[in-house]
Image (cartoon, rainbow, N blue to C red):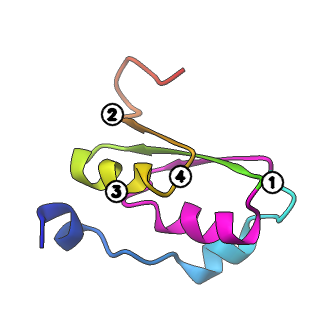
C-alpha cells in the first residue's frame, strides 16, 4: 500500500455527495485526494465536468483516472491552475 492510500480514505462523504445538485455542469473539488467524491458524483451525473486540485502527487495520479482533470499544487501558492 503506498503513502497516498494510507493518508487518504478512498470513499466519498455521502452527506456531501447528496448536497451536490444533479444539475451541476462543473465541479471544482479542492483537496480531491484520490477522486472518490468526484467519481461517485460522475456516476450520478456523467455529463458533469469534475476538476480536482490535490497537493499529493500519488493521490492526484489516482484521481486522474477518475476525474475530468486534476491539477497538482497548493491553492494558496501561485501559480493557480488555468
Image location (x, y in percent) of residue 51? 57, 43
In the image, residue 56 above or below residue 77: below
Residue 24 badge: 1
Q: Residue at x 44, y 78 (%)?
A: 11
Q: Is residue 33 magenta?
A: yes
Residue, disc 2: 73
Query: Circle 4 sits on which residue?
Result: 67
Q: Residues within 10 Å of mark 4 (few under 14, many from 20)?
A: many
Q: CA distance from mark 4 to mark 2?
A: 16 Å
Q: CA distance from mark 4 to mark 3?
A: 9 Å
Q: Secondary structure at mark 1?
A: loop
Measure how far apart labels 1 and 2 are at the Cα level. Answer: 24 Å
Depth-wise, is mark 4 or mark 1 nearer the camera?
4
Location of residue 32 in the rendering, given as x and y in whole percent from the top left corner = 44, 55
Question: Residue 31: x and y, percent?
Answer: 42, 52
The residue pinned by badge 3 equals 62
Image height check: is 77 above or below 14? Answer: above
Amino acid at each position: 500500500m503506498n503513502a497516498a492510500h494510507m493518508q487518504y480514505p478512498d470513499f466519498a462523504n455521502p452527506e456531501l455527495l447528496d448536497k451536490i445538485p444533479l444539475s451541476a455542469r462543473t465541479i471544482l473539488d479542492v483537496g480531491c485526494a484520490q477522486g472518490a467524491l468526484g467519481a461517485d458524483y460522475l456516476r450520478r451525473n456523467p455529463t458533469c465536468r469534475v476538476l480536482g486540485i490535490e497537493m499529493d502527487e500519488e493521490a492526484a495520479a489516482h484521481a486522474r483516472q477518475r476525474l475530468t482533470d486534476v491539477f497538482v499544487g497548493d491553492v494558496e501558492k501561485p501559480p493557480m491552475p488555468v
